[in-house]
Image: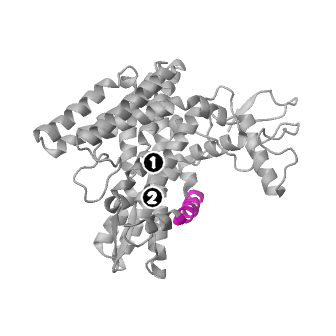
Amino acid sequence: MTDATRAVRAPRATLEMPATRPSPPRDAPTRWPGGAARRSLFRSAGRIDAATPASRDRAVDALRALAILGVVLGHWLVTALVADGNSLRAASPLGDMPWLAPVSWAFQTLAVFFLVGGHVATRGYASARARGESYGRWLSARLSRLFRPVLAVLGLWTVTAVLLLLTGAEFGTVHTLVKLALSPMWFLLVFAALTAATPLLTRLSPLWPLVVVLHVDLLRFGFGAPSWLGWLNLAAGWLVPFTLGAAWTRGELDRRRAGWILFTGGTAATVALVAGAGYPASMVGVPGAAVSNLNPPTLAAVTFGLAQCGLALLLRDRLRRAMRRPVAWAAVALVNLSAMTIFLWHQTALMATTAGSLLLGRLPGLHTRPDGLDWVAARIAWLPVFALVLAGCWAAFRSCERGGARRRSKIVRAHRPDDRTRTSGARHV
């Protein structure tokens, strides 16, 4: 995802190492126990850590990785495909077990992603202007990596939908699968629109879009305005954390007090809206529910996002310290490298596992109705399988995100040994 999701650019072979052998990473045992694989892991992590520019704010990448993984795990935990005869229908454990709503509080992390996106976009745009780079070139570079992986998803699901219909699959089942597979793309459209508007948003206060969301909800729920009016919040709601990211770039959120104000104020407002104003407790959509906090975003979802953004700001120092550990940093960097691939294909991994295993019968936690704790336990047991299938999708389609040409990364630099034919310094990979 351009500057917002740039991460380690691993070379096609191996990173070239300095002439001297690197010392073991700080979190690695001195004698390298565990065999060659463990030894290789620590050495690779050490290379990535040593090659990362010292000026890199690793907390930004850590927050982005946590946001992406939160969305993935959240979808895997609350999205169910129930087998009903020869068809599949979407369901959610939050429908039969509303007391599980706190799960959505932990894994609905899109506000953090927009916070980081706004911070990186405004900072990157300022840097581009300082270099004399045009707006068009800057925007093209950012959006190209955002949308390259989309073509692969659209192509595969177009072919899959046609084949399913030709082989006699029910239209309702095909519609359910395609809708779930392509649903993450609404996020990309909103994010792309806000990114394109970055020059206009660098100085915009988050209070303005927050006021828009407040008035839209007041008209919808208080005065009976048409429900379509709520879609204004699709832009305004996510503009709030995006402009908070711009405020971060301006240095207005550097003090911990700003994080505490956002966290406590957002939490108090969300509790008041849920407990006193009748907003749903779940921060994700629930099939069959009269009101969704997410489609389109409501005031409760926005205030909850403010609380999440405040917590993210409070965690920055701890994340920076944690990212000094080479293995932790290497994992975060690799997630950032494939952020869009992971995001776009995680629902496909879930559905491929669900549909492919139908030949084995109705399996608990996969094809059964999500109406009890036994389903929850079974679904948790399926998470490693989803992750394995997603790893296969990543291996097959990661090149779509990286593009055909070898591109420079701002995170990792491979250092070459000095000699008479090469100048000293670093080469971007």
Residue beneath label 1, please?
107
x, y (%) of residue 345?
A: 48, 57
Which element is circle 2 on?
Answer: helix
Residue 389 falls within the magenta-colored stretch: yes
Q: In the image, what residue occupies the spot 80% across and 27% down? A: 423
| Depth check, front residue: 263 or 242 | 263
Question: At x 30% / y 42%, what residue is drawn?
Answer: 297
The residue that disc 2 covers is 77
Q: Residue at x 45, y 37 (%)?
A: 112
310 in magenta: no
Q: Is residue 85 visible?
A: yes
Which of the pair 149/170 is nearer the observer?
170
Asked whether the beta carbons under mark 2 and mark 1 sit within 8 Å of each other, the answer is: yes
Please report whichever mark, 2 or 1, sits nearer to the chain's N-terminal start.
Answer: 2
Residue 260 in the image: x percent, y percent?
A: 46, 26
| Residue 143 lies in quadrant | top left
| Vertical side of 264 occupied by 296: above or below | below
Please name the colour scheme applied to the rendered image. Answer: one colour
On-image quarter of the C terminus: top right
Rounded to the nearest angstrom, the CA distance separating label 2 from label 1 is 9 Å
